[in-house]
Image (cartoon, grey):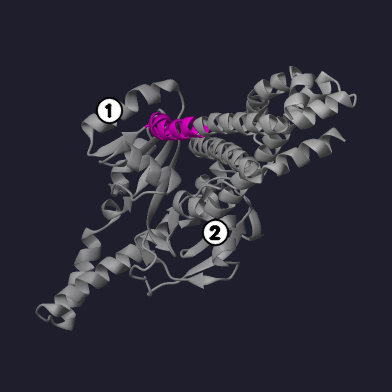
Amino acid sequence: MMLKLAWKNLLHKPLSTLLCWILLAVSVGTISLLIILQNRFERQFTHNISGIDMVLGAKGSPLQLILSAVYHVDAPTGNISYEEAQKWMHHPFVEKAIPLAYGDSYKGYSIVGTTKDYPDKYSATIATGHWYKNDFEVVVGSALAKKLQLKTGSNFYGTHGQDEYGEEHREKAYTVTGVLNPTGSVVDNLIIGNIESVWKIHEHHHHEGETNQKDNGHQHEAGEHHQHEEEHEAAHGESEKELTAVLLKFRNPMGNVQLPRIINKQTNMMAAVPAIEVNRLFTLFGVGIETLKNMAWGIMLLSGLSVFVALFNSLKERKYELALMRTMGAGRGKLTALVLLEGLILSIAGIITGLLLSRFALWLIAGRFENDYHLSVQSWALQIPAELYVCALAIIIGLIASLAPAIKAWFINISKTLANG
């Protein structure tokens, strides 16, 4: 009975009720969305660098190297010599080294040449098909296979660079030999093959470019051209092979202390420590997220004020009605509880709507996050305990806002109110 009466009282002033409801829903929804994004962002970024103590790459920005080599969300800083990198890959301090060679993509998604250690690091297993065995054979991450409708036996051409509309390497097609099970890591959005495929496709592209340049300049005899290619291949051997980056895991803490400093000072390569760069990234993102959270908390406090104003004004108009209820046997406690119940209903309605809004917003931006950052952000489950704290605080704010009107209802002067009409 009281619940029905409280609901009717709220509907008596629909615009005021709607304003309170919207403010609460927006504040709860914004905070909820930020909590989910922050949790997923930190969890997946931390998961992807697990087991990587250092990344070896070309000179440039350390953060850019980490983002490109570990998360594949930025352009590489350049290439490094395979021969030079091997010296550090076989260093006594290094337990495991995973070489990466890339620079091509398919519809904007990286084609990564590496060893079997790379998918093993993320515990990737085959869902259908089998692992690649030969050159230009690849396996595809689960999310990417679904998105691009790739399956075992599919063929495609790689595109130079990360641009979806870049120049295609039409001379050789890649064949999908397997699709991976979901891992919840960056592997879910990658195409993975062997390093030799990447070297061969770029070697062919390089030779083709040289041939075209000669044809556009002055012509050579066929015999001379053939002789030049033989000399070129003799000169370009193992030393010309390049890697984009190497992921390193150390045997002991001495590697963390000594190798980054030695490499950065004594070589033309760069060593970046993922833990340091990711913490820096968290700090940068954290400032923005905290600012947005503070704004949302401000909106929630504003919604509490609007609940107070709405109930207080409503109480002034219903004083005669409440006085009549008192004469008919309703006690002070019942009237006070009625006003508090109205505030509670508004709070719960705002919380439910806010949580639904956050999930809807998450659904809208999930595709963009997966495409741009290779992060899976869809999470319909309640984030415990963070979101429970938000819900509890929203209820407390609603009850506090309705407390003053409730106290006023307790002290209604029946005779005076009825006499004044």
Farthest residue in the left direction? 218
Neighbour tally class for label 2: few under 14, some 14-19, many 20 plus, Cα within 10 Å: many
Q: Residue at x 12, y 81 (%)?
A: 219
Question: Tags 2 and 1 in contact by the CB under 8 Å rule?
Answer: no
On whether residue 291 falls in the magenta region, the answer is: yes
Residue 165 in which image quadrant:
bottom left
Please state if 3 lies on the left or on the right of 73 as rendered: right
**Quarter of the image containing the N terminus?**
top right
**What whole-number distance in Å separates the C-alpha atoms at marks 2 and 1?**
39 Å
Please report the residue visible at 25 percent of the width from the left and 69 percent of the height from the top.
207
Q: Is residue 409 magenta?
A: no
Q: In the figure, residue 300 lies in which quadrant? A: top right
Q: Magenta residues?
A: 273-296
Give x and y (percent) for residue 164: 39, 65
Q: Of helix, strand and loop, which mostly describes the magenta segment?
A: helix
Q: Residue at x 15, y 75 (%)?
A: 214
106 or 256: nearer the eye? 106
Q: Amino acid at mark 2?
A: Leu
User: Camera-side residue: 184 or 5?
Assistant: 5
- Nearer to us of marks 2 and 1 is 2
Task: Name the N-terminal-most of marks 2 and 1.
Answer: 2
Q: Tag 1, which secondary structure?
A: helix
Determine the residue located farthest toward the right in the rendered image: 329
The residue tagged 1 is 262
